[in-house]
Image (cartoon, helix red, strand yellow):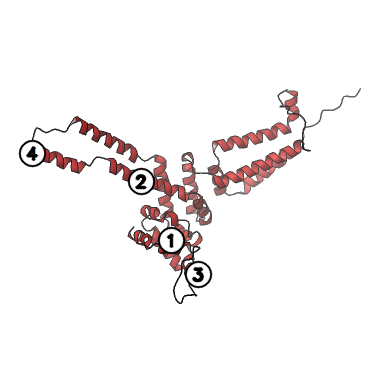
Amino acid sequence: MPVSAQPAIDTTNLLTILGVVAAAWAVISPTAKLSFRLCMTRRDWLIIWGIVGTIHVLVFDEVFRSLKVYPDLGPWRWGMDKNGAIYLLFLTLTAFVSWRSRTFRLSTRKLPLFDQLTTSLLHSRKFAELGALLSQHLGELVATSQIGGYRTRLASWIAPGTEGRLEDLARQLAADPAVRPTLAVSTLEKWRASLAKAISFQQPSDASKRAILKRLLSSHDLVTYLALAHPYLCLPAIKRVTEIVEDFQDVYFEALLSSTSSVFFTEIRNSENLCEGNRLRLPIENRLLNFYCKDVRVAAELGKV
């Protein structure tokens, strides 16, 4: 009786997938590769390798069956087969990588890579890519520096007033040389000083984020590009940004005023009120004028920074 040949392992799907991945990786720029590394965490890599491992198990199922380690989950359902499952897994992997590249947060472990990526984009004048990256992470960078400012002010408020305390002690000693600070007062001041020091302590990651933000926004070319291409990006945090980079607001408005196609002139034209003579109005969509002119105290406060 002739012995039937064992079915050969079909690796066509696997080779096609690997070929597409290798071709895509070869043509993308080094900056895009850094961006990909930036958005992937250890948990993401675990999910990716889990999907890749499942695809290999399905392709080499005969090998695993002969070793009796293949998980037997019963017959295929809903008209699916091995090839269909491989395709769905690859589609899921592609969708997951695409989703993670748009929703990732800047972790402390990724700060050196983020610094390397932004430096590369800044010095190669790839402002479009850098602007897209800042639109995702500028709020996080500014929030970190803002928290540091709040902590510094809180620590200053908690810390014992050294000058006032020395004046009081000098006055008391002049009146009665035998007077000495009580143990309770000394203990309380030591506790307040320790608490203030703990609150004002700045994490290395916070300092790194502030340094990255200051280096980027100190570039006049980048600020000019942001003013024209992303004019509303820095508005919510412009006060904090101006505290970090003193001339940011000046460069920002110089760029807006130097181009008649900027959002500033566009909003001025859209603010003409043709129904009430020569008066101007502030529609909600004119975000720049609304930010500065709806409450004049905002403009006055920012003018002092």
Q: Position of residue 106 (x, y in %)?
A: 49, 43
Q: Calculate the distance from the C-alpha at mark 1 to the C-alpha at mark 3.
A: 15 Å
Q: Which of marks 4 and 2 is nearer the N terminus?
A: 2
Give the quarter of the figure containing the N terminus: top right
Q: Name the residue under label 3.
A: 270
Question: Does the residue at mark 4 contact the one at mark 1 (Cβ under 8 Å)?
Answer: no
- Residue 212 shows up from this direction: no
Q: Whole-Å distance between the Cαs marked 3 and 4?
A: 72 Å
Neighbor class of circle 4 (other Cα within 10 Å; few <14, some 14-19, many 20+) is few
Q: Mark 1 points at which residue?
A: 291
| Label located before the other in sequence (3 or 4) | 4
Residue 212, disc: none
Amino acid under disc 2: Tyr
In-front residue for pair 184/88:
184
Whichever of callouts 2 and 1 sits on the residue coming sooner in the sequence is 2
Q: Pick whichever of labels 3 and 2 is earlier in the sequence.
A: 2
Q: What element carries label 2?
A: helix
Q: Residues within 10 Å of mark 1 (few under 14, many from 20)?
A: some
Query: At 44% across and 55% down in the image, what residue appears?
Result: 236
Residue pointed to by mark 4: 175
Secondary structure type for disc 1: helix
Q: Residue 150 carries which label?
A: 2
Percent x, y of residue 67? 73, 23
Label 1 sits on what residue type? Phe
How much space separates mark 4 and mark 2, taking CA atoms?
A: 40 Å
